[in-house]
Amino acid sequence: MPSRSEPKVITSGLLRGWPLPVPTGGKDNRGTVLVVGGSRFTPGAVLLAGTAALRAGAGVLQLAVAASTAAALSIQVPEALVVGLPEDGDSNIDGTGDGRLPELVAAATVVAIGPGLHDIDESRVLLRRVRDAVRPQTALVLDAYALGALSHEPGLLGDGIGPVVLTPNLTEARHLLGRDLGEDLAAEAAALAERYQAVVSMYGHVADPAGGSWREESADAGLGTSGSGDVLAGILAGLLARGAEPAQAACWAAYAHAVSGQRLIPRFGRVGFLARELLDEVPRTLAEL
């Protein structure tokens, strides 16, 4: 494993010294984010991730979701191209169907896969289809059940894949490592980064396979709410689409996510705000940096 120094604390000063690429030109210059996920019963996860990507500055948003939810999502997110994918008998996306998915993957700058998926086997099929269609320069963000699929098949991504960012919660991290986690989460994030050769954003800890390590310290209990992880994955995807490097995007996303939650505390208290309420705070948080 690469030698690692003490994790750097992610502060506004650190991020100002590590500025994001400055957007220029039209929407195509800020990249295309494709979010693959959802089932008939969980389209909201894709809505949160996709909207967060736009709030973080992505230029174009595309959503590939269960067909039964596509019409509703196209109304809820009129800024996005929404493509319905076939469903299996349990209302999950059938990864063996629709020929449109490879086309969308091949055209994307960033593919975020996992929000709202609910079946490990179908997630493995979808992840394989994404892997087979993705361009070498395209970044992948794996969240939720896509991480579960990777834990069942650690070599699934294989060689020749571009930048990968993993966004596990603690349970998903345990499955990815195949063991219980220790108390040192920075070390566990580093172990994941080394094992999967990916940038890892886990519970405020960011690690990259080259040995970099960071931690975000301003997150509060309110972020532990349904849909919050989907927002984080979307912010990260949006920053990658703008041209940020993977570790940079992960650090900026962790900070924007946490500080957006802090902004909601005066109105709602430490707990009780909703994941969707984070979305409107993200652009302001980023702009103030």
Image (cartoon, grey):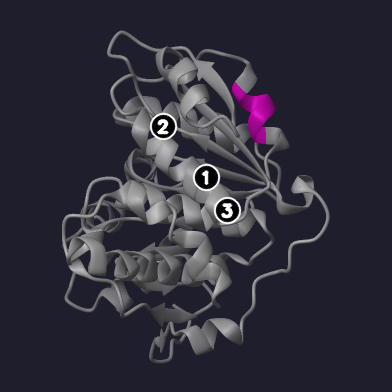
For label 1, the crowd category at 10 Å Cα-Cα, with few meaning under 14, some 14 to 19 and many 20 or more, is: some
Residue that mark 3 sits on: 238
Residue that mark 1 sits on: 157
How far from the left and from the top, in percent, is residue 254? 41, 68
How far from the left and from the top, in percent, is residue 106? 70, 34
The segment highlighted magenta reads 101-105
Q: Amino acid at mark 3?
A: Gly
Residue that mark 2 sits on: 124
Whole-Å distance between the Cαs marked 1 and 3? 22 Å
Asked which secondary structure carries label 1, the reply is: loop
Whole-Å distance between the Cαs marked 2 and 1? 10 Å
How far from the left and from the top, in percent, is residue 237? 54, 52
Q: Amino acid at mark 2?
A: Arg
User: From this viewpoint, is residue 287 visible?
Assistant: yes
Against 270, residue 275 (above or below) is: above
Q: Which picture quadrant has residue 7?
A: bottom left
Towards the viewer: 6 or 259: 259
Q: Earlier in the sequence, mark 1 or mark 3?
A: 1
Name the front one of labels 3 and 2: 3
How far from the left and from the top, in percent, is residue 180? 16, 62
Main secondary structure type of the part rendered in magenta: helix
* On-image quarter of the N terminus: bottom left
Q: Is residue 27 magenta?
A: no
